Structure formats: structure tokens, C-alpha cells
Image (tube, rainbow, N blue to C red):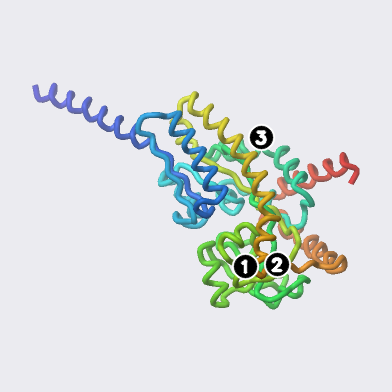
Amino acid sequence: MNKYIFSILLILMSFIISGATWAAEKQLRIGTLAPKNSLYHRQLMELGEVWRAAEGGEAKFRVFPDGSQGGEAELARRMRIGQLQGALLSVVGLREIEPSIAALQNMPLLFKSWDEVDYVREKMRPEMEKKFLDKGFVVLAWGDAGWVRFFSKDAAVRPDDYKKMKFFAWGSEVEQQSIMKSLGFTPVPLETSDILPAIQTGMINVVPSTPYFALASQIYNTAPNMLDINWAPIVGALVVTKQAWDNMTPAVQSAVRQASDKVSVQIRAKARQEVDEAVDAMKKRGLIVNHPSPEQMREWDELASKLYPRIRGTMVPAETFDEVMKHLKNYRAGKGK
């Protein structure tokens, strides 16, 4: 009798555990550095509603904006240990999962237009998504957030002007910091949440940032000079863990895929439009836009050419670096450039 009761208890326990696991699976928690109520936050909320409606029942969806779950490296860590099921990340966070993604963002002054960015990304997309899948993540949507510009307290137009200043640098990008130091620049490793207090106290006086982020975070109030060069695109993606994806039924996966494709297009189109809109809004509030002359622009191009050999094999895997260059060459040849 005792053995019989024990067996029944085991069966009941298995049902209880299974039910608890299923309940836990019916939640999707997404982290992002994007500000609350921003374009990116709103698109995530819309996607979440599609997922929740498709799942039905007690499915729960929550977005954690404003970096409330930590910096991008921390978001990647939280996904790995199951505290988050997904995150909207820039290359800074994505390279914590798959280093080759850095090729789309960490090659300064390489891309001359969004058409070039789109072409190279789409050429590399299938293999890139497979690499993420092999690491346990599913890429749902690709997006971008505008071009990086330099916002500084004092006016600057030449590379040497910035050697007297202290740059914000991502704390997780050690290779970038090493390269900057070797070229005479001063990086200060911080997290995104530290930028505003750091520039207010003088810990840093240059912030590489997209215009939209500079406007949303009010960086331009303390760093009112912007250098008008497209240093590099901020490229990102929405990823979820493979475990979270596999817990969805095929019907739910299909609904999420369709919504994600729509989100990708909307984020890219609107983000690119907001670059100019953000600059115009800041100019009305006192932003000074500094335009390099052709001679000064040549100095920036020379700096970039010095950076590429240092980036290849360190910040960007050599094979991926070469692949980007090949696709870009093919694109420009086809355009007669």
C-alpha cells in the first residue's frame, strides 16, 4: 500500500511540476536600453500583443525599457540564465552572443548609405542567423537606430581635436578601448546609464551617439556640439532564446514571425527618418552642428583606414571583415561606384 501511495504521489508531483513549468513558459520578458515610449519600445509592445493574443490564456508579456535590467552585456547574460526570454540589442550586446555581428557596426566610415548597409546585411543575414541559432538564440527582427555622430562639450572637427577629450566607451568593448588608446584617444569605459551624469561631472566630454538617443537622453544639453559625419550605423536585432521559441506552437511562431517582419520594416524606416528630425529638434534648442571641410574629412578617412587593420581579427573576426568588404565591393561595382 505504501508503495502504491508513493507511486501515486510521484505521478501527482510530475503533473504539478509539468503544470508549473508550462505556466512559466507562458511568459515573455524582453529587455532593452531603448527609452520608454520610444519607437522601439512601442514596436516591442505591439509585437508582444501579437504573441499574447496567439498564445491566449494566461500568457504574460513585459518589456523592460531604459536599461532597467542592466547594460547590453548584462541583458545577454540574463537571457542565458533564463531571467529574460529576449532582448532588443545593438551590436554591442549581440556580439556577446556572436562576435561576427560586429562587422555591421564596428567598421567606421565604411558604409556611405543605408542602401549599402541593407545590401550587406541581407547578404550576410542567413548565415548570421544560423550562427545565432547555433548559440541558442533566434533572431526575430533586424533594425537600426541611425548613424553615430560625436556630441561634445567643446567644438571639434578634426580627429586631433578629440585627442584632448575623454570619450564614452562601452565597458564591454575592451578591444575598442585598446585601439583608441594606441591612437592617442582617451576612452572612459561606462554603461549607458552612466553617460549623462558622467558628462555633467566632466568624467567624459565626448559621447558617440545617434541623434535620436542624444535627444531622448538630453545629452545635447551638456554636449551641445555635434560633428556632422556618419561615423557608423547602429545596427541591432530582436532576439529570443531558442528555448522560448521552441515553447511556442507552430501557429504562434508563424504569427510572431509575421509581426516581426513588419516590426523590422517599421523600425528601420522610422529610425532613419528620426535622425534628421532629432537633429532639427536639437538645433532649435541650441545644438551646434559642426561640418568638416573636405580637407578635414580626408583626415577622418585616413583615420578610418588606419583603424581597419587593427579592427580586422580583433573587434571583427577576419573572415567576416573580408566578407563585408567583398559584398560592399560588389555592390559598388554594380552601382558604378
Between disc 3 and disc 2, the foreground one is 2
101 or 89, which is in the foreground?
89
Q: Is residue 281 left or right of residue 75?
A: right
Residue at (53%, 27%) from the top-left corner? 254
227 or 24, which is in the foreground?
227
Residue 195 at x, y = what percent? 55, 67
**Residue position marked by numbered label 3 in the rendering:** 126
For the image shown, how many numbered marks are present on the structure? Answer: 3
**The disc labelled 1 sits on which kind of residue?**
Tyr
Q: Which type of secondary structure does the marked residue at label 3 adopt?
A: helix
Residue 271 at x, y = what percent? 65, 49
Q: CA distance from mark 3 to mark 1?
A: 38 Å
Mark with earlier residue (3, 1)? 3
**The disc labelled 2 sits on which kind of residue?**
Met
Could you classify mark 1 by the number of other residues whose Cα lies within 10 Å: few (under 14), some (14-19), or many (20 or more)?
Answer: many
Q: CA distance from mark 3 to mark 2?
A: 36 Å
154 or 102, which is in the foreground?
154
**The disc labelled 3 sits on which kind of residue?**
Pro
Question: Residue 106: in sight, yes or no?
Answer: no
Q: CA distance from mark 2 to mark 1?
A: 8 Å
- Residue found at the far left of this picture: 1
Could you classify mark 2 by the number of other residues whose Cα lies within 10 Å: few (under 14), some (14-19), or many (20 or more)?
Answer: many
- Circles 2, 1 touching at the beta carbon (< 8 Å): yes
Residue 90 at x, y = what percent? 59, 51
Question: Residue 159: in sight, yes or no?
Answer: yes
Q: Which type of secondary structure does the marked residue at label 1 adopt?
A: helix
**Residue position marked by numbered label 2 in the rendering:** 226
Residue 69 at x, y = what percent? 44, 54
